[in-house]
Image (tube, grey):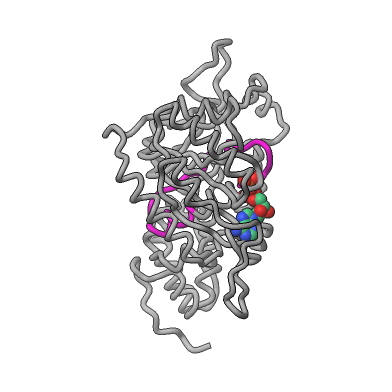
């Protein structure tokens, strides 16, 4: 194979490098950077990818250069592939989360988790540090979308104790291929540690633990995938976290509109802003003719936006490609402008509803 001419520097784009030098994907994977095949990498340099994953850039660039010369993956030192995470033993006890945005829906099955994932991907493409707190315990949507299966690792908090004098459990978030940090009840194993976490079957309490007892990195955006509806659990999140505002996901159905009205009223009663509406499964566009079919009936987005006093962030079509990637745990491979549209409009809405200046500290 002739040696490729592409320059390998921290500023080299990951996708372009892998296209020229396929062994680069293997090198990145050896460093735990699974992102070389995902859509975020089209927008990311080696340095940005390394930083997002908490890795040092120099060993990665050196290994890539060596791989170009030799055509194979060189030996990589263990310490070079360890992300610089807050180790539980050295846990400083403070993570700064600049913005918290719960994603809510009046009822289940409208695609709330998928929309959460699309927003997260859009924000990551803009190089923000993003986390997802999956508080929707009704199903394993979020881990499934990102292909996560490993149970979360749980250690004993070196400092904090429960009222009973036991060390508090401390959860390490899972990290997706594109470096989105994810915590989900569906990633807890049935071990004894788990029993410590589930003190009482109260969902709202679990959500609170996911917020407080997790070694989140400092994040720009934490998206919270709320349980559907207006029960206790979403209510607690809205009341107890310092949120920027809520994104409401709906579908073009009269029933969905009614339940979304209830959700909007709840948010307004709590005096929190609704940042925007996303109408999912809005229509289907035939790939051959471009004709739009309103499978679930006419759009209610404008009506819902009026009820919620919030802008429509996007109308997302029914899309077999999204469903397939979602099913296969490869949603980060979706290269669709909808991710950018959602992120951009959400950022605009957050800017339009500034919350008090200070970042919030958790743990
Ligand atoms: P919720 O979180 O509201 O319960 P999910 O995000 O789990 O809903 O979505 C329910 C199902 O619908 C999933 O299988 C998902 O892949 C699929 N789905 C959601 N939105 C779309 C869409 N726009 N096009 C195709 N399939 C979708």
Residue 93 visible in this rendered orientation of the protein: no
Give the residues drawn in magenta, as a range. Answer: 119-143
The residue positioned 47% from the left and 56% from the top of the image is 314
Q: Name the spot of residue 260 as percent of width and height, x first.
A: 55, 40
132 inside magenta stretch: yes
96 sits left or right of 111 in the view: left
Q: Position of residue 161 (x, y in %)?
A: 52, 17
**Could you tell me residue 204's position as x and y percent?**
58, 25
Question: Farthest residue in the right direction?
Answer: 190
Q: Nearer the viewer, residue 303 or 314?
A: 303
Which residue ends up furthest to the bottom in the rendered image?
A: 2
Q: Is residue 361 left or right of residue 136?
A: left
Residue at 43% across, 60% down: 340
Q: Is residue 186 visible?
A: yes
Image: 193 above or below 99: above
- Front in this rendered view, residue 251 or 81: 251
């Amino acid at each position: 194979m002739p040696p490729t001419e592409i320059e390998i520097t921290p500023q080299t784009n990951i996708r372009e490098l892998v296209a020229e030098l396929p062994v680069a994907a293997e090198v990145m994977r050896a460093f735990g950077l699974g992102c070389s095949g995902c859509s975020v990498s089209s927008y990311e340099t080696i340095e940005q990818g390394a930083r997002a994953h908490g890795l040092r850039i120099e060993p990665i660039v050196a290994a890539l250069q060596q791989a170009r010369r030799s055509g194979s993956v060189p030996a990589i030192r263990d310490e070079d592939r360890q992300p610089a995470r807050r180790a539980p033993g050295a846990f400083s006890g403070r993570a700064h989360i600049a913005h918290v945005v719960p994603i809510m829906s009046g009822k289940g099955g409208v695609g709330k988790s998928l929309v959460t994932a699309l927003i997260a991907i859009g924000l990551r493409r803009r190089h923000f540090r993003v986390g997802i707190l999956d508080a929707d315990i009704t199903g394993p949507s979020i881990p499934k979308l990102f292909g996560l299966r490993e149970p979360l690792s749980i250690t004993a908090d070196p400092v904090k104790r429960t009222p009973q004098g036991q060390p508090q459990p401390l959860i390490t978030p899972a990290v997706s291929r594109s470096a989105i940090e994810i915590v989900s009840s569906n990633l807890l194993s049935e071990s004894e540690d788990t029993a410590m976490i589930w003190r009482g079957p109260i969902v709202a309490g679990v959500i609170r633990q996911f917020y407080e007892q997790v070694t989140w990195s400092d994040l720009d955006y934490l998206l919270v995938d709320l349980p559907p509806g207006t029960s206790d659990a979403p209510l607690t999140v809205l009341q107890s976290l310092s949120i920027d505002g809520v994104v409401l996901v709906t579908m073009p159905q009269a029933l969905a509109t009614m339940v979304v009205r209830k959700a909007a009223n709840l948010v307004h009663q709590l005096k929190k802003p609704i940042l925007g509406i996303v109408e999912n499964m809005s229509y289907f566009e035939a790939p051959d003719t471009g004709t739009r079919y309103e499978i679930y009936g006419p759009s209610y987005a404008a009506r819902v936006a009026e009820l919620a006093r919030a802008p429509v962030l996007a109308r997302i079509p029914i899309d077999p490609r999204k469903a397939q990637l979602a099913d296969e745990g490869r949603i980060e491979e979706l290269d669709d402008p909808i991710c950018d549209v959602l992120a951009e409009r959400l950022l605009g809405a957050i800017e339009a509803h500034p919350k008090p200046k200070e970042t919030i500290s958790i743990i």
